[in-house]
Amino acid sequence: MLSLLRASHFGPTFAVTLVSFLLAVSLWWEGPAYVIAFGVFLGQLLVGWSNDLNDYQDDLKHNRVNKPLVSGQLSTKKLKLAIKIVAPMALVFNLFGPLGFKGGSLYLFGVGMGVAYNFYFKSTLLSPLPYALAFAALVSSIVIATDQAVPIWLIAAGAILGVAAHFANVLKDLDQDLASGIKGLPQRLGKKNSRIICGVLLITLTLTLNNANPNQLLLIVGLLGSVLTSISTKKWIFKVLMITAIVDVILLLEAAGAQIGSISV
């Protein structure tokens, strides 16, 4: 079980699930929020697992023993079986849970974008596109489930955060990716340009959320984190981005609660 969680890229999977839960709580209440979060978690498992499955040969080439498939803690057969079991569960919990057909379909579209990135977009100039669509779909699906219109700023915030996460995540393995012929947009732009773009995106995100719901303290922290992200080494850039993202998520949740409001149940 632990190896399956590690193969799902548990850190990002947990972060996305937590954000979904907090946003659902701000719009619903804890009961439906737990079901929504579980459905989101199942979808993120599929994205992470398909990533490790598709990258298996390349991970072997670069001896990435921190991955369960490479270290031998998990077999491809077992991982494929897990995908076959979880996929229908993800459909049921998202389409027939609190998200409903509209919200559930939109979230599953985002999951599909994540899988499409793994198998196709990863090596194209359009590599940021699945991230933008998937993150925008995630936050939008929860709002749509409440039968409310999704604010443009929320869609934009999700998309911007997704693209920033893409650039930051690629930086740590950029040289190895190029050696393997993986040439998404960050790889083509290079380390320096990608780091700058990541910082600019996070500054834009922080300003967008602060404009929706002003908060001076979090604005300062968010902007500082954005600057630190742009100058961090490849070892720390994703970690700094995650800290900045947490601050931005707090801004997002406050803005969502203030401008969208809670539904009555």
Image (cartoon, rainbow, N blue to C red):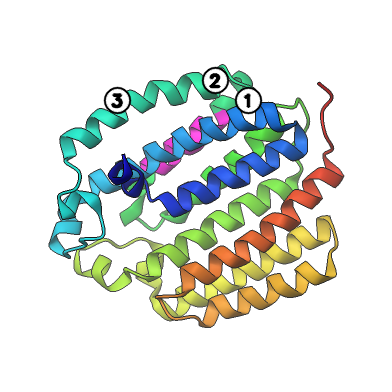
Tags 1 and 2 touching, CB below 8 Å: yes
Q: How many marks?
A: 3
Using the rendered view, name the quadrant where residue 225 is placed: bottom right
Using the image, determine if residue 155 lies above or below residue 41: below
Residue at the spot x=62%, y=73% of the render?
Answer: 226
> Picture coordinates of residue 37 (x, y %)?
57, 35
- Residue type highlighted by circle 3: Lys
Which comes sooner in the sequence, label 3 or label 2?
A: 3
Say which residue appears at 17% left-offset and 39% top-offset.
76
Task: Identify residue for label 3.
Answer: 84
Mark 1 or 3, nearer chain start: 3
Residue 107 within the segment the image draws in magenta: yes
Q: State how far apart marks 1 and 3 are (Cα).
A: 22 Å
Q: Which mark is residue 99?
A: 1
| x then y, percent, for residue 108 | 49, 31
Which range is magenta? 106-116
Which residue has dot 2 on it?
Answer: 95
Q: What residue sits 40% from the left and 72% below the top? A: 189
Which is the main secondary structure of the residues drawn in magenta? helix
Query: What residue type is disc 2 on?
Result: Leu
Task: For label 3, count other residues whose C-alpha is less than 10 Å away and answer few (under 14), some (14-19) or many (20+).
Answer: few
Answer left or right for 69 relative to 40: left
Look at the numbered disc 3 and give the secondary structure of its residue.
Answer: helix
The crowding category of the residue bearing disc 1, from other C-alpha atoms within 10 Å (few below 14, some 14 to 19, many at least 20), is many
Mark 2: give few (<14), some (14-19) or many (20+) Cα within 10 Å.
Answer: many
Is residue 84 in view from this perspective? yes
Q: Type of residue at label 1? A: Leu
